[in-house]
Image (tube, rainbow, N blue to C red):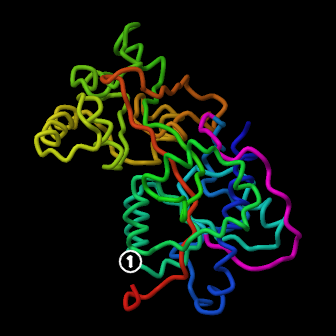
Amino acid sequence: MKLGRFGVVAFVSALLLAGCGEEKKQEEQSSAQPATEQPAAQAPAAEQPAAEANTASTAAAPAAEAPAGSGGELNVYNWSDYIGETTVDDFQKATGITVRYDVYDSNETLEAKLMAGNTGYDIVVPTGSFLGRQIQAGIYQEIDKSKLKNYGNLDPQILKALEAFDPGNKYAVPYFWGTVGIGYNVDKVKERLGDNAPVDSLDLLFKPENAEKLKDCGISMLDAPSDMFQTALKYLGKDPHSKSEEDYAAVEKLFAGVRPYIKYFHSSQYINDLANGELCAVIGCRATSSSPPPVRTRPRTTCISIIASRRKAACSGSTRWRSRKTPRTSTTR
């Protein structure tokens, strides 16, 4: 199943999620606008392909089509490359609602805007590990589940897991789940490390002797401390949620050993760079690095989610639609 089809399902649910606060927002905050606007008829990342369905959908059935011409406006802030190429345009045609759609590439970027207030966004899509404290900060409004006709199609196990961050599933609807893993150029890695290259292990990038040999063809890692620190802790056989200073000192030492060989840290640029042959090995999100590159004459690339053992382990995560409260000034926070 393609992302485009799934995106329509989840996106429609997301828009319904915002419906319970739309009238109030229009009356009280009609002048609020997102920081950066993107033309609604375009995909959020034009150079990036729609991801294949190797990330799991949590909604199983399509939503009923709403009557056209209902009007209104919805402001959405989502991860880059996390929606179908035609989803926004399809939704606008089906509902008559104007969508303003912007993208970000890290939880930290999103959280900084949310905590500052007055973003103008109605729907945002951060990952679960950031949800709890954002709920405590009073950023989100509760979901009116009676308006979500397909809520019963959500995976009960996923919903139960999310209760660790959102007790009672009051504020969030699951959208994607996936893992942090390795993406690599098959031919370039084999050329430098041979037939026995540890492509099924984070040894590929965390062992200095391997990273040094891959430096010339390009290495990249996520610019996301919450993802990279947990991945490194897991690799070292430690608790990925550790609060031990000694554990983080070990992580610092691990990164220091390979830092000279890393081309850059970024949470979205690697998608096209790996596809176009400008990188040969990355630590990235499974949802994006496994997408087919957007050029026909692309190098051979593959992606692996590393989950087999403690030294070959990466952390899983998920993203959720969340309904933002009407933007508030600092005096009412």
Secondary element at tag 1? helix
Residue at 56% over, 49% down: 159
Quarter holding the N terminus is top right
**For this rendering, which residue is in front, 6 or 207?**
6
Residue 166 shown in magenta: no
Quarter holding the C terminus is bottom left
Q: Quadrant of residue 136?
A: bottom left
Q: Quadrant of residue 209?
A: top left
**Bounds of the magenta segment:** 54-75
For residue 16, side relative to residue 29 (left or right): right
Q: Residue furthest toward the front?
A: 168
For label 1, the residue is: 116
Q: Position of residue 67 (x, y in %)?
A: 89, 69
Label 1 crowd (10 A; few <14 / some 14-19 / many >=20): few
**For this rendering, which residue is in front, 6 or 170?**
170
| Type of amino acid under label 1 | Ala
**For this rendering, which residue is in front, 296 or 171?**
171
Residue 73 shown in magenta: yes
Q: Position of residue 161 (x, y in %)?
A: 49, 46
For residue 158, side relative to residue 312 (left or right): right
Q: Position of residue 138 (x, y in %)?
A: 43, 75
Task: Assign the magenta stretch its main secondary structure.
Answer: loop
**For this rendering, which residue is in front, 23 or 285?**
23
Say above or below: 267 vs 108: above
Say above or below: 132 vs 315: below
Q: Quadrant of residue 64?
A: bottom right
